[in-house]
Amino acid sequence: MKNSFFKVFSIVCVALTVIFGKATPCVALKIRPSGTLQVFTQWSTGSTLGFTSPYADKEINNNFRAAQYYRLQFSINPDEVVSATTLFEIDTYWGVDEEDTEFAGGQIGTDGVNVQTTYSYLHVRPTEVPLEVRAGLISAHLPNQVGGSIILDDNIAGAAMSYRLTPKINSTLLWGRPYDNADHSVSNQTMDIFAASFNYTPDHCTLTPYIAYSQFGKDVSGDPLGSAWVDGGNIGLWNGFSDFSGNPWAFWTGFSGQYHSPFNLIFKTDLMWGTLHGGTDAASRQGAVLLAGIDWILDFMKVGVLGWWGSGDGSNAYKDGAGRMPFVTNQWGLTDFGYYKYAITTEESLLIQDTTGRWTLGFVVDHLVLAEDVSTACTFLYMRGTNDTDAVKNNRFSPELLEGGYRNNWGTYLTKRDWLIEIDSETTVKVYENLNLILRLGYIHIEVDPQVWGTSDTRDAYRAVLLWDYQF
């Protein structure tokens, strides 16, 4: 890890030296650094939500943890026609040795820091035409209004082109390559995704229809499904009853909209449908997710009501294909506890995981000003599953897997008889102009039907985070 860090650091220094060396008096070179440094302590009740595991001694149950999260961005000539942007991340758990490749560098000596390149791309904005192009390691997301894109919202290697047809009409094309196996002796290990959106912004409105298509080989993440899909998302099934064959493909279509009323009310909606052809019925899936929300903007706070419905699996999903909408990968989330949102401040990023297979009602209070430099936000979510109980009772979820809760986060799969609530709060104190002290509290309670799962022995999840946030 130490050699890796110095290697990356040396490359960055050499690149900047070359850039400065080629600069002439006639060409001004501007480098604009920006970033975030978060240092925090966290107390939580373990790494998973759901059934109490008989393998508790094998689970990662660090009830107290200290860590830090660092993002450093360099924008080169950001105001010019051609510019470049690179973002590095260094995430470190205090005390973790070099054997931990993801959050290393916190052990004594602190010399094993892992430098990650989050994105690095060229940005071209010609003055002659209303066109913008980004190419490289970019941040890509499909249109959304509530919590982020459910289908695709992540960093990806690819290119995006945006063209403004009129002052109120804009179109965007995206090509990305999430996976490309270096072993070309094995076929069907490449995945491409293509997307197009059309954005129309009349007075007080934003209307954005879009489509997306992906084609990939059955071995793109290993055969059967390997860790790439588990780490990257759910185009396969997190609960794992698919085995791709042939040349699978997926297609999505959706609509995202927002309306600002004259009474400080904001109406938001995201409607989407997706289908995955996996080569066989059992490996395929098809479903929809519908989201809506209303925000009321007041002088001292914002109040919101939201809800969504996601189609679920039928009783014979293992034979006929899943009823949950496929997606590639996302960081969708209304909270940073149950849903992945803020990097490593989540003890387990797969507590609830996604919106599919459940319906939810929520209430949000945001930007509530308690004092001049103190504000708070609160979120309450109630959700039930939309998956058929027979999808569990047909014994596909074996007793061994149910008992091995340390391997699978069973809170991600809810049937029509299961429900949970999540309550979160975040209080921010402005210490200095660019420095905030943040307290995050989270609680999740889950109830499952013992006639479905064979047990109701579940555990709640708690978390408290005290975080120093510095922006520059």
Image (cartoon, helix red, strand yellow):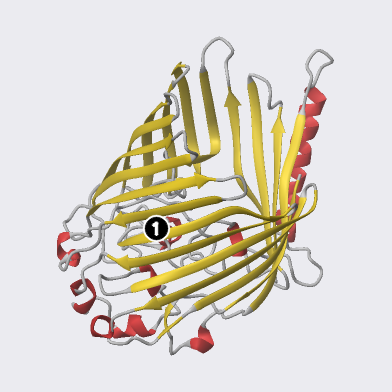
| Left or right position of 356 against 134 | left
Q: Residue at x 24, y 75 (%)?
A: 392
* Front residue (pair 233, 436): 436
Percent coordinates x, y for residue 382 in the rendering = 39, 66
Note whether residue 73 is visible: yes
In the image, residue 365 sits, relative to residue 465, either above or below, namely above
Quick one: SS at disc 1?
helix
Image position of 50 (left or right of 371): left
- Image quadrant occupied by the N terminus: bottom right
Q: Residue at x 37, y 48 (%)?
A: 292
Q: Quadrant of the C terminus?
A: top right
- Asked if 1 appears above or below 158 in the picture, the reply is below
Residue 453 position (above or below residue 254): below
Q: Residue at x 47, y 46 (%)?
A: 295
Give x and y (percent) for residue 76: 71, 30
Instruction: Identify residue type, mark 1.
Output: Trp
x 38%, y 50%: residue: 328
Give the residue at the far right of this rendering.
25
Could you say where residue 280 lies in the image, as x and y percent from the top left? 17, 56
216 and 464: which one is in front?
Answer: 464
Q: Residue furthest top?
A: 128
Q: Where is residue 409 shown, x and y percent of the image?
A: 42, 73
The answer, for residue 114, to whether it is visible in the render is no
User: Would residue 209 appear left or right of 421 to someone viewing this image?
Assistant: left
Q: Which residue is mark 1?
A: 229
> Based on the displayed image, in which of its 4 quarters is residue 384 positioned?
bottom left
Q: Residues within 10 Å of mark 1 (few under 14, many from 20)?
A: some
